[in-house]
Image: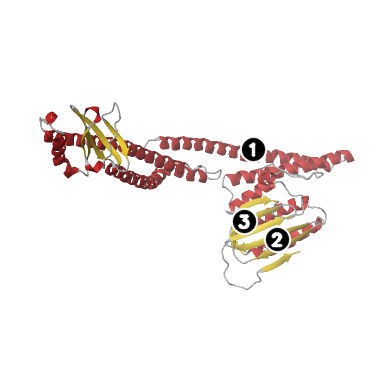
Amino acid sequence: MRSIGARIVLWYALTATAALAGLFVAGHYLLERYLLHQLDEINEAQFKELKAALGPDYPSLTPLAVDERIREVTESASALFYIDMHGPMTNRFFKSHNLHGLAIPDIRGQHTYTVTLDPIGPLRVTEFRLPPFDVTVATPLAPLHELMNGYRRVFLGLLAGMLLLTVGIGWILSELILRPVRVMQATAVRIRSDNLAERIPVGAVKDEFAQLALFLNQMFDRLETSFAEIRRFAADASHELKTPLSLVRLHAERLLTGELGPAQREALQVQLEELQRIDQIIDELLFLSRADANAVRLDLRETRPDDFLNAFAPDAAVLAEHHGQVFGCRHVGNGLVAIDVNRLRQVLLNLLMNALAVSPPGGVIDLESVVADGVWRLSMIDDGPGLAPAQCERIFERFVRFTPIGQDRPGSGLGLAISQSIVRLHKGTIRATSDDAGRGLRIVIELPATAAAATRTEPAAAELAT
């Protein structure tokens, strides 16, 4: 079992039930011993009554006289006792009628024992010496067996009830015991890079859970400090690098106005391109640092997805045509989404540029848009080679690039990380998959949407660009 709560319930139920079972087994043994001892005492009391009935002159009595005196005191209890009296050489002086002529078996060396006499059944036997006679008194064990059977039935019923009861009590106990752990878990889930100020509440009772909460809070304090220092370093370094890079770029552009040979001019052009790339990386790192610090403010406005796509699709189609490819966009559903139009346009352009870079000439880039069940789902599908599942998991990491074999396209590896940050700022999700695309890679964005007011009637599906 993976759940600690389930293990607590199981352990508690099994332990309590096993303890009760042990008590019942011990009680069964002790009760049976006690009842057998009581039967032995009853047999002894019956023997004393029989001895008193015989009187002190019993050795001189004839067998007929012995039989008469014993029957006077035993006939009334014939359902409870079986009596067998014999003298030396095993000659019988008395045998109760309920024995039906049978003899009670004798076990040598034992004076109290249990035997089974067919057809009477099990008997508890006690032997007594009444010189020169041996007197055997037996009591039926059937009532005792019925009593013990009833005890076992009650035991099994109580054991089943105990198991059910302990499962319920164990579940309640596990909920109470693990409540601090669940609070810690819920708080720890909420503590992310953009929410490092929250802390786990520490209970008033200074137990192990309180100590664990204090330890975790100290760890989160250290993490918050480390994240703050890293963000501060990234922001400071980016700002400090901007000025010298601008100066280097300025001087390189000034050199281009002078008299240079073709080789020097080409070298300066390469330097300017690399400087521009470094400047772009710095801007991207600055944005990611601000996004991690939750310092990016979005200009959220309620927008109709079809209006947004109507403005985006023509530009995307022209861009695709410039690369010798085709862009198609299809939208289904009505609704409103709270988005920063410029930021979301930046995300889609970034995805489109990646799709154009990996798709072959004449390839088709599709953008599918669906509003349903309170979600706006955007899917960008390309004609590229796709990615493996492990690569799809890592594609949004910073500085991670998966360039197809034979291609060497420029890029910093930060575009998809920035896109992910923008989508998350919109309270949405973004993921990549090649399993259900049917051809290349599918990037799926999901943003919360609300039902649109019925201000105008539009078709449920529309081709926005081809």
Residue 358 is left or right of residue 11, and the answer is right
Measured from the top left, where is residue 149 in percent x and y? 32, 44
Give the quarter of the image for residue 208.
top left
Does residue 133 lie above or below 75 as drawn? above
Q: Which mark is residue 446?
A: 3
36 or 211: nearer the eye? 36
Determine the residue positioned at 80% across, 59% down. Answer: 321
Q: Is tag 3's residue or tag 2's residue first in the polypeptide sequence?
A: 2
Look at the image and tell me whether residue 343 can be seen: no
Q: Which mark is residue 312?
A: 2
22 or 354: nearer the eye? 22
Q: Is tag 3's residue or tag 1's residue first in the polypeptide sequence?
A: 1
Q: Residues within 10 Å of mark 2 (few under 14, many from 20)?
A: some
Give the quarter of the image for residue 265.
top right
Determine the residue positioned at 34% across, 46% down. Answer: 153
Measured from the top left, where is residue 214 in percent x and y? 44, 36
The residue under label 3 is which amino acid type? Glu
Q: Residues within 10 Å of mark 1 (few under 14, many from 20)?
A: few
User: Which label sits in the foreground, 3 or 2?
Assistant: 3
* Figure label count: 3
Alpha carbon separation for disc pair 1 and 2: 35 Å
Residue identified by numbered label 1: 237
The residue under label 1 is which amino acid type? Ala
Give the quarter of the image for residue 144.
top left
Dot 3 falls on a residue whose secondary structure is strand
Dot 1 falls on a residue whose secondary structure is helix
105 or 227: nearer the eye? 105
